[in-house]
Image (cartoon, rainbow, N blue to C red):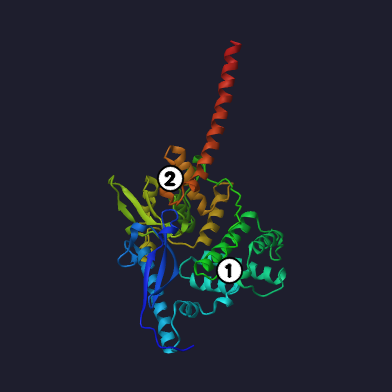
Amino acid sequence: MKKTLTTTFAVYFHLKIASEKDGKMPIYARITVNGKRIELSARNLIEPFHWDKKRGAAKPLNDSYKKLNNFLEQTRSSYFECYREMCLQKLEITTENFKKEYFGYNCDEYTLLKLINYHNIDMKELISWGTMKNYHTTQKYLEKFLREKMKREDIPLDKINYKFIVDFEYYLKTYIPTDHQKRIGNNGIMKHMERFKKMINMALKNEWMEKNPFKAYKLKFIKFERGYLTESELKNLEEKNFTIERLQNVMDLFIFSCYTGLSYIDAIHLTPSNIVTGIDGERWINTQRRKTNISVKVPVLPKASEIIDKYSNDPRCQSDESLLPRISNQKLNSYLKEIADLCNIKKNLTFHLARHTFATTITLSNGVPIESVSKMLGHSKISTTQIYAKVIERKLSEDMHKLKEKLSVKYNQMQKM
């Protein structure tokens, strides 16, 4: 239907206060067409004190918030571009028609595969390549489930219900891979369900679905005890010197993480500007977790300080403007396996093990309060950090059991005297 062009169109970004989660609020775009409004999710969260309400943008305190503002401006431009296209085609511009044109199809055409494609295209610039790769794997299983069990190529979103959810979970549990022998474990299945749930939440936020099929569904992760290096194992690594440069670089990166708790992606992207002077006059690392955008401040312990100084004049670091040598995660973990063999470490030595070692051996075992450890690790919930505390409690129990045995021996000896 073609009508007279609309005369007013405005876009304003704001925080949805009612949806606060872990101290952050979701950003929404309020689009006004001739006085009528629609709300569209901007698919980002931010702490309220980092939000400039008047400007409808983040306070650009660091690169992460600058990128967020760039994304919001690109999104705003895409809204106006859609509006201009509708004007050129002399289409009736209403809030509902705008939403249909912007998302590319009518409400009655919303399907699961269109949702997945929309998610993967729209989120491509917001999440890492590794995470996006996992979403593509979940997509593969959803497509196989539709073909093999439901005998169809696609399904409308309004036909996805609780039964669809549990049937998909059962399919994953009973799926026998043809390219490798092991079936998907419980936590692997739950990660697929978690990603599927996030895509459904996107559809709900965009009002493509009325009912949430995941409302009664509970993710059932099995908690495993996190591995870590003991003091003696860590000392064994620290005292080892390699003549092969690539192994020594990897060893230094690993030990650096053991004394800072930084993940691979956060450690590898550190620059000299991330080293600041704290209120105690000492060196601190001031950065932001790329996974969650949570600010992290960690005091630089002596061992980590030695490694920083070691590479301060390294030509590779100067060229990359990085604090430490950069190496791919895949190569790094491959070399760690080699290091484990050379150092007679029987544990599965991965870079993430260093983060667990910082939490257990370096901090909690030495009496650092769990609240402080949680902040240094950049956890949004202290319950995540408590997993490490349970490890410490078990170690304490084992130590006390050994003490009881020693005391029992001494007591028996005294009784015989």
Residue 173: name its quadrant. Answer: bottom right
Which residue is painted at 41% across and 88% down in the image? 4
Residue 295: name its quadrant. Answer: bottom left
The residue most toward the top is 417
**Residue 3 appears in the rendering:** yes
Q: Amino acid at mark 2?
A: Val
Residue identified by numbered label 2: 373
Name the spot of residue 415 as percent of width and height, x first. Answer: 59, 12
Q: Nearer the viewer, residue 308 or 266?
A: 266
363 up-or-down from 414: above or below:
below
Specify the quadrant that holds the C terminus.
Answer: top right
* Nearer-N-terminus badge (2/1): 1
Which residue is painted at 51% across and 69% down in the image? 207
Residue 40: name its quadrant. Answer: bottom left
Residue identified by numbered label 1: 136
Q: Alpha-carbon neighbours of circle 1 within 10 Å: few (<14), some, or many (≥20)?
A: some
Q: Nearer the viewer, residue 34 or 282?
A: 34
